[in-house]
Image (tube, rainbow, N blue to C red):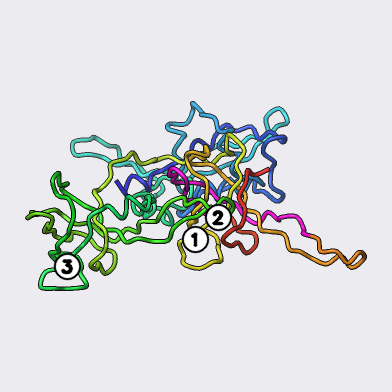
């Protein structure tokens, strides 16, 4: 499943008319962009446009290119003009042909090329892969009612992969596998003080073996860090993973805050994963791009002596990649100035 994430694409980059009213060309943009290994569609669109999230809304399929939705290292993105309007076109780079046993081929002098089999993803996936499948946001009740680890074999208090452990709870309808979680921070709305959920931090995986009364025996099959008594056992969830990201402007007006950053510090920087106080109930969707605004400083008016709050300043851009009922996860794609928890997020203008 993880391998498929590395082949995510955000859409097509060919045959795109860049309408000045919607997507403005960036000053100093290139006329030709050679796609490199490690590029993302966000990188490429940022090279051409001031507002890269507007690009996917204008992508069109070029029928002359086989599978134009896939962009590879070695391809060329060219800016040309058609009827006076800028258009981006895709020119395929060299490809290595793979032959199977039994094929008849004709050998002739040719340029040696490398295998190019990595599709350019929409955003830097290495920063979010763990958050796509790990960690959850639960209610306080869901966590408090879940089974918990009682002890390790031979009274071990620190456990890892391969260890046998004992859990206490209701095993009347046991599952084959359980995730091991530790209670993390509680998310609260900065304005209403409503509790939005509790982070359940993923530690590993345990396989159910047997049970006697309310005590069950498990074998730890995966661990990211030390597992200890009191950690929670929660059945593995089955849900559809979003495999394609289309960065876009939200369909409705969004206003919220960054309420947590997973890096463990208050300051936020590019490629940090943050938690927003916007969830499914607010209409937020995967792929929504939001501008991050830092709170304007309060200064003293030297003429009147009054204290005046300066306007909030736009300092960055993020994209939502996972949603829950009351909160969502976002990846900081651009940080033009220092960001921090409680900075406001809203629709990009």
Observer-nearest residue: 265 or 12? 265
**Are the residues at dot 3 and dot 2 in contact (C-beta closer than 8 Å)?**
no
Pointer 1 residue? 261
Pointer 3 residue? 151
Local packing at callout 2 (Cα closer than 10 Å; few below 14, some 14-19, many 20+) is: many
Q: CA distance from mark 1 to mark 2?
A: 8 Å
Observer-nearest residue: 96 or 342? 342
Q: Give the residue displayed 45% in from the left and 61% down from the top.
A: 262
Residue 293 percent coordinates (x, y): 65, 54
Q: CA distance from mark 1 to mark 3?
A: 32 Å
Say which of marks 1 and 3 sits in front: 3
The local secondary structure at tag 2 comes to strand
Chain-order first, disc 3 or disc 2: 3
The local secondary structure at tag 3 comes to strand
Q: CA distance from mark 3 to mark 2?
A: 37 Å
Observer-nearest residue: 181 or 35? 181
Pointer 2 residue? 258
Q: Which residues are magenta?
A: 309-333
Residue 238 percent coordinates (x, y): 28, 41
> Is residue 89 left or right of 326 when viewed as pictured?
right
Within the magenta stretch, is there residue 318?
yes
């Amino acid at each position: 499943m993880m391998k498929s994430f590395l082949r995510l694409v955000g859409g097509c980059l060919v045959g795109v008319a860049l309408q000045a009213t919607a997507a403005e060309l960036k000053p100093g943009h290139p006329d030709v962009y050679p796609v490199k290994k490690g590029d993302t569609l966000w990188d490429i669109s940022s090279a051409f446009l001031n507002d890269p999230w507007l690009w996917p809304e204008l992508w069109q399929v070029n029928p002359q290119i086989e599978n134009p939705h896939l962009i590879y290292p070695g391809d060329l993105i060219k800016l040309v003009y058609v009827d006076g309007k800028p258009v981006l076109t895709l020119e395929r780079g060299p490809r290595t042909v793979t032959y199977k046993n039994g094929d008849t081929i004709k050998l002739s002098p040719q340029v040696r090329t490398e295998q190019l089999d990595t599709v350019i993803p929409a955003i830097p996936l290495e920063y979010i892969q763990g958050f796509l499948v790990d960690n959850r946001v639960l209610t306080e009740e869901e966590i408090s009612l879940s089974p918990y680890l009682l002890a390790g074999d031979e009274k071990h208090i620190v456990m890892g992969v391969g260890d046998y452990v004992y859990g206490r709870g209701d095993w009347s309808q046991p599952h084959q596998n359980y995730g091991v979680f530790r209670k993390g921070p509680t998310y609260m709305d900065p304005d209403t003080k409503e509790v939005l959920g509790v982070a359940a931090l993923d530690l590993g995986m345990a396989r159910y073996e047997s049970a006697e009364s309310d005590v069950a025996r498990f074998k730890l099959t995966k661990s990211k860090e030390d597992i200890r008594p009191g950690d929670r056992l929660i059945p593995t969830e089955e849900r559809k993973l979003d495999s394609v990201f289309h960065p876009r402007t939200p369909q409705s007006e969004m206003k919220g805050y960054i309420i947590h950053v997973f890096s463990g510090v208050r300051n936020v920087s590019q490629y940090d994963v943050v938690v927003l106080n916007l969830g499914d109930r607010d209409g937020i969707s995967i792929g929504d791009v939001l501008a991050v605004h830092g709170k304007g400083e309060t200064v003293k008016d030297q003429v009147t002596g009054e204290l005046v709050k300066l306007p909030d300043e736009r300092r960055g851009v993020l994209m939502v990649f996972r949603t829950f009922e009351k909160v969502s996860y976002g990846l900081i794609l651009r940080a033009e100035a220092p960001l921090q928890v409680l900075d406001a997020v809203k629709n990009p203008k």
